[in-house]
Amino acid sequence: MIGVGKMKQYTNVLDKPLSRGRQEVSLSAFAFLFSELVQYNQTQVDNIAELERRLEDAGYAVGARVLELLCHREKGNRRETRLLGILSFVHSTVWKVLFGKVADSLEKGTEHEDEYMISEKELLVNRFISVPKDMGAFNCGAFVAGIVKGVLDGAGFPAVVTAHFVPVDGQQRPRTTILIKFAEEVLRRESRLG
């Protein structure tokens, strides 16, 4: 029989279907590329705050693209319209696609109504980076904060997103917390929606 077992040949990459395919990247390849990204940006800046801002900008571009891809694949081109829905989407779906597991925790801030925190015991981008003593509290989690900001901004939930180290008793390495502080307009819209 002619054609049995043959794969359809595509002449253009845009004609290929957006199938799930293999979604894994070698951990060593990712670690190498991310290390190069950090080292390159380190040579372009004068201080740690600027380095973290550049990593956040790089992550922002990734986050915007991840949102588009996941909305197309997972949600049939629909986007979240509620605050808890988008937070759950970031905490579970986005995290699982990027890091292979759901984030360790999602918590609402106790002091401020507009703050939420995503915590990770050992964030992948901090796992293979050794920070020199002269760089102090440099946190590569700024890249992930940028990804989260890109997803939230693209979905219509503007926020200030930052990465922080939080010491944990009995552990050598601190956990990373992604702090999300939503804009006032998001809270007004959420209260209006009920």
Image (spheres, helix red, strand yellow):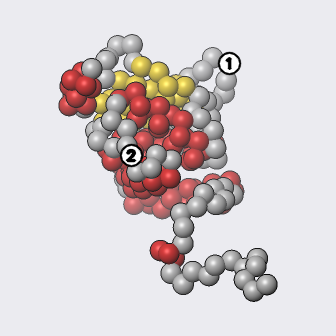
Compared to 112, does 147 lie above or below? below
Q: Mark 1 points at which residue?
A: 170
Residue shown at the point (56%, 56%) measured from the top left: 34
Task: Kindly indicate the quadrant of the structure image that contains residue 43.
Answer: bottom left
Residue type pointed to by label 2: Arg
Residue 194 numbered tag: none
Q: Within 10 angstroms of label 1, few (less than 14), some, or many (20 or more) residues?
A: few
Residue 78 numbered tag: 2
Task: Kindly indicate the quadrant of the structure image that contains residue 96.
Answer: top right
Compared to 183, does 112 lie above or below? above
Q: Which of marks 1 and 2 is in front?
A: 2
Task: Depth check: give the residue in front, 177 or 80.
Answer: 80
Asked if residue 23 lies left or right of residue 65, the reply is right
Please provide percent x and percent y for residue 41: 44, 58
Q: Are marks 1 and 2 in contact (CB under 8 Å)?
A: no
Circle 1: element type: loop
